[in-house]
Structure formats: structure tokens, C-alpha cells
Image (cartoon, coloured by chain):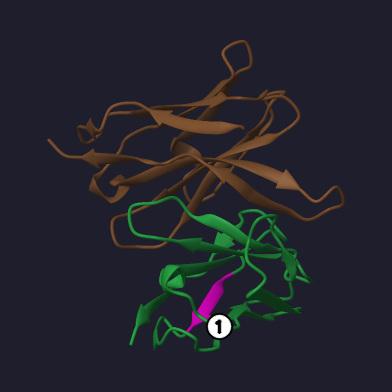
Chain colours: A green, B brown
Amino acid sequence: DIQMTQSPSSLSASVGDRVTITCRASQSISSYLNWYQQKPGKAPKLLIYAASSLQSGVPSRFSGSGSGTDFTLTISSLQPEDFATYYCQQSYSTPCSFGQGTKLEIK
Amino acid sequence: QVQLQESGPGLVKPSETLSLTCTVSGGSISSYYWSWIRQPPGKGLEWIGYIYYSGSTNYNPSLKSRVTISVDTSKNQFSLKLSSVTAADTAVYYCARRETDGDHYWYFDLWGRGTLVTVSS
């Protein structure tokens, strides 16, 4: 099974900051990497698929990059509604697997 | 628009079988893969398995011996059964749709709101 490791596990930032979250796969997964945002008590919401493709309706301040084993999610200018937990997920092989999450908190 | 809604008991006794149903509204269950994903309180996400509308399935090996996912296209529903549950199976259970980009990348683009299932006597 492929293990997904996110860093950091938690992050404090301010509105307007540029933030980067990293996800590392235990083996190469090409670009089979998705990013989700989850707010408390809500289901995850798809942000980015195929490592860098922005899901319809998602603000352009979110971007994704990477391939192989190392990936990043960047939020160019944090907005109040962006404080949430973010998960990466590999769709390269079954079972698909998620990172442990990165909790983005207000500084 | 397409919406997913989980339903089923919120409390299950240890050693019994957890049963949940996901109803797809606003669209057809056909031509998609449908998944169950769970999240223990305060923890991360775990994929349980998926079913294609035709009935073919794939399960997480960690749960395979206890999981059955089925589909009822006439009702636009798919279901999860997890047997021999323990407290470790306490979680919010989500149903989700697996979409593709038309090529070979896939992702979970639609999710239900989730339902908390507690395993306790």
C-alpha cells in the first residue's frame, strides 16, 4: 500500500499570507494526487485533482504542483474561509489512501 | 444537482453488523463508481471500498473480510455492510462519487454529509 505523509501537521497563519502544504508519497504516483479541504462537521471538498488541475468553482488562489513522490498545495493569499484541514489523496493504486491531514489555523 | 444522503442506525452493538445506505438524488447512479469512506472522530480519512453501478466491487484489504457493498439501481441507492464491529469502527461514514477527468485521473467530487455511527453496548 502507498503511504501518504503531509507536512506540517498543523500550521498557523494570518489572513493574506501565502501558505504551502506538502504531501509525500511512499512511492512514485505520477500525477495521481488530489487535494481536499474539510471544515469542522462537514464533508471534504475537492480542490485540486491530477496534482494541478483546479476543480470547477474553486478560487484561483488555490494551486497544486508536483509529480512522482512530492507534491504541494499553495494558497496564494489566505482568506478567512480557508482555515480548515487539508488532505491529500493518491489515486494511483488501490487501496487509495489519504494523508493524515494538515490543520490550518488562524494566527 | 446531484446529491448524496447517507442513512442508517447511529448506534450499533459490538459484534453486530453496521448497515448504511446512500441515496443518490438529482441524477442517475449509472456510469459511475460509488465509494464509502470513513473518519473516526478527530482522525483522518479511510477508504472502505467502491462499487460500480454494474455491481463490480473493490475493497480496502484492511477491511475486506468484513465489508460488503451492494447497489440497487432501481432505487438509485448503494449500501454498506460491515460485520463484527468493534469500538474501532466508530466513525463518521461518508458516501462519495468517484469522477474521472475523461482520461485516467479520478477523484471524489461529490460527498454526502456523513453519518456518525457509534459502536457501543
Is disc 1 placed on a helix, strand or loop? loop
* Nearer the observer, B63 or B10: B10
Q: Any magenta on residue B53?
A: no
Most foreground residue, A62 or B101: A62
Residue A5 in magenta? yes
| Position of residue B119 measured from the top left corner of the image (x, y, whole percent) | 22, 40
Q: Residues within 10 Å of mark 1 (few under 14, many from 20)?
A: some
Mark 1 — residue?
A: A77
In the picture as drawn, the residue positioned furthest to the left comes out as B121
Q: Quadrant of the C terminus of chain B?
A: top left
Residue A56 falls in which quadrant of the image?
A: bottom right
In the image, residue A19 lies at what x, y percent? 53, 86
User: Can residue A101 be seen at all in this image of the molecule?
Assistant: no
Count of labels in the image: 1
Magenta span dominant secondary structure: strand
Looking at the picture, does residue B103 appear above or below residue A54? above
User: Residue at 53% across / 55% down in the picture?
Assistant: A45
On the question of residue B24 being in view, the answer is yes
The amino acid at mark 1 is Ser
User: Viewed as shown, does residue A31 lie left or right of B25?
Assistant: right
Instruction: Name the quadrant of the N terminus of chain B.
Output: top right
Q: Residue furthest right?
A: B103
- The residue that appears at 72% across and 79% down in the rendered structure is A65
- Residue at 62%, 67% in the rendered image: A2
Q: Given the image, what chain letter belongs to the residue carrying mark 1?
A: A
Left/right placement of residue A67 relative to residue A87 reads right
- The answer to which quarter of the image holds residue A67 is bottom right
Residue A26 drawn at (x, y percent): 63, 77
Residue B83 in percent (x, y) is at: 37, 32
Q: Which residues are magenta?
A: A3-7
